[in-house]
Amino acid sequence: MRKQLETTTENMRIYVRNNDIGKAYRILNKKLHEEGFFKKLRDNQFHKTKGEKRREASRAGRARWLKKQKQLEIRFQREERNQFRKKPRNNSQNKRRVNKQR
């Protein structure tokens, strides 16, 4: 897997169009970020023990779990609120109602 990641960075090409270096730079940063280049750079900057890696993974998992729980809670509250809203009537029901009033 390492060779595969290394080859993608070696073969990456960004073309500058209309002398717009700013846009090319943004595209380069986006591609590097998606590939995980900056994360690898940060991780390899200092040595981490096995325990540190495990604790970091545990913290990241807990953060993902809490985020998911929060999203589910928000979705549940929205569904609960929508149960009590008046639903719009069908157009055919409105026509019948108007005909009865005449």
Image: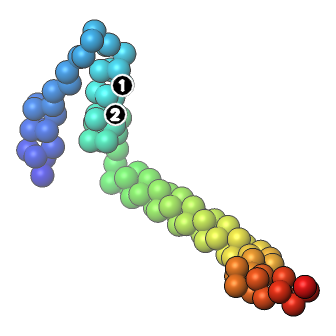
Q: What's the residue at 60%, 65% (across, down)?
A: 71
Residue 55 visible, this orientation = no
Q: Is residue 102 left or right of residue 32?
A: right
Instruction: Provide the secondary structure element on which disc 2 rests.
Output: helix
Q: What's the residue at 26%, 41% (across, down)?
A: 35
Residue 12 rendering spot, x and y as whole percentages: 15, 31
Q: How is the image coloured?
A: rainbow
* Kind of residue at badge 1: Arg
Q: Hey, which residue is sitting farthest right in the picture?
A: 101
Q: Which mark is residue 26?
A: 1
Q: Please state the total of marks drawn on the protein image.
A: 2
Q: Which mark is residue 12?
A: none
Residue 66 rendering spot, x and y as whole percentages: 58, 64
Residue 20 rendering spot, x and y as whole percentages: 32, 13
Q: Hey, which residue is sitting farthest top in the picture?
A: 19
Q: Image height check: is 32 above or below 80?
A: above
Q: In the image shown, does 96 or 28 lie closer to the viewer?
A: 96
Quadrant of the rendering where the C terminus is positioned: bottom right
Residue 13 rendering spot, x and y as whole percentages: 16, 27
Q: What's the residue at 28%, 27% (across, down)?
A: 28
Q: What's the residue at 28%, 35% (across, down)?
A: 31
Q: In the image shown, does 47 or 8 lie closer to the viewer?
A: 8
Q: Is residue 2 left or right of residue 68?
A: left
Q: Which residue is mark 2?
A: 30
Q: In the image shown, does 68 or 97 lie closer to the viewer?
A: 97
* Kind of residue at badge 2: Lys
- Where, by quadrant of the figure, is residue 6 drawn? top left
Instruction: Provide the secondary structure element on which disc 1 rests.
Output: helix
Q: Image height check: is 82 above or below 8?
A: below
